[in-house]
Amino acid sequence: MKIVELLISEISGFLGFETNSLVDKPAIQENFFAFNEVEIEDILTLQIIKLALEEEMGVKFDQETEEISELTIGDYNTRHFDIDSQASVLYKKIVSGELDVDMDVAKRSAKLQDVLFWIKKHTVDQMESASYNDVVSAQTLAYEILQLAEIMGLTEEHQYVYTYVQEVRDLAGDTSLDVDVTSLPAYTNEVTESNFSFASEDQQIVVGPLMIPNKQILRVDEEGNPFYVFFSKDTVKAIAEKMMKDKLLDRLNANHDPNQPVEGHMMETWIIEDPKKDKASIYGFDHLPAGTWMGMYRITDNKTWARVKSKELRGYSVEAYLKERVVSQ
């Protein structure tokens, strides 16, 4: 899968930091044009399966002929829920109204799970081999599913997705001599990697990572093809410095909507140099790598603060104009 490095040009005054946003999904999971949300499950359904299974493993996926299960969520018919009775029972309760959740969120989660179940079927059950990209795809899917589960208030009920990630990961490590999954971070079912930490609830202060270097972020191009982007340590540092130079410290909005300005101001910002000794660990961010750009804001807008405390807004997302360099096809 293509990997693209995002860069800031030293000779262009146009490229660089634009604004920071408080978002429901943190910056490291958003795309780089404005880091706004993409309907990623549809892209994953149509593209990741084709790339990970057809190109690498020779498996053909035909949406028109694939067997449709009896489960219909909104206007979406599931295809692979037969693999997990727990998922079927849970989503039948949602469809029947026994569990009162947003049906659009449930449908999106079901689409993502269909892809995860498909990957498991064709790697573990049929092909008995899995690639590095299969593991990355499974982990990305599970992360998205558990975020949606948290929105629905059904985090515990969705713990079964972790089983499928681990099965694919174990298979890749055990059976493919050319696949090194040890470089991947261990998958966690805790959706906390880049959330805000409350420095002080009474004073309405939040702190968290603005950008994390060398973290591969799944995105899609204009034709719907998935690829990964990342920022080097030098680029993260350059963007942080340009924010300071251009005096844009207090530029804030919510969910990348210019019509939702946020009243607040930056109190501190720094680059982590030594993860073991950095003050980020005080706020629970002892897992972040060197080169991570941290930010602390005081939110003076009471309505926005209420959204932060309710976890509707859970992390930062940086908007920036950047150029790109393809490092792997």
Image (cartoon, helix red, strand yellow):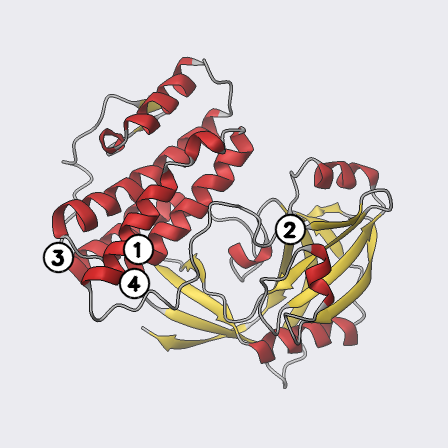
Instruction: Name the residue type under label 1.
Output: Arg
Tell me if 295 is positioned left or right of 61 in this view.
Answer: right
* Residue where numbered disc 4 is placed: 132
**x%, y% of residue 256?**
64, 51
Image position of 22 with respect to 74: above or below: below
**x%, y% of residue 292?**
62, 69
* Residue where numbered disc 3 is placed: 58
Q: Could you tell me which secondary element the residue under label 3 belongs to?
A: loop
Q: Which residue lies furthest to the bottom in this view?
A: 11
Is tag 4's residue or tag 1's residue first in the polypeptide sequence? Answer: 4
Do residues under tags 2 and 3 come within 8 Å of each other at their CB atoms? no
At 56% from the left and 52% from the top, the residue drawn is: 36
* Residue where numbered disc 1 is placed: 169
Q: Nearer the viewer, mark 3 or mark 4?
A: 4
Q: Nearer the viewer, mark 4 or mark 2?
A: 4
Q: Could you tell me which secondary element the residue under label 2 belongs to?
A: strand
Is tag 1's residue or tag 2's residue first in the polypeptide sequence? Answer: 1
Is tag 1's residue or tag 3's residue first in the polypeptide sequence? Answer: 3
Q: Between 221 and 273, which is closer to the camera in this rendering?
A: 273
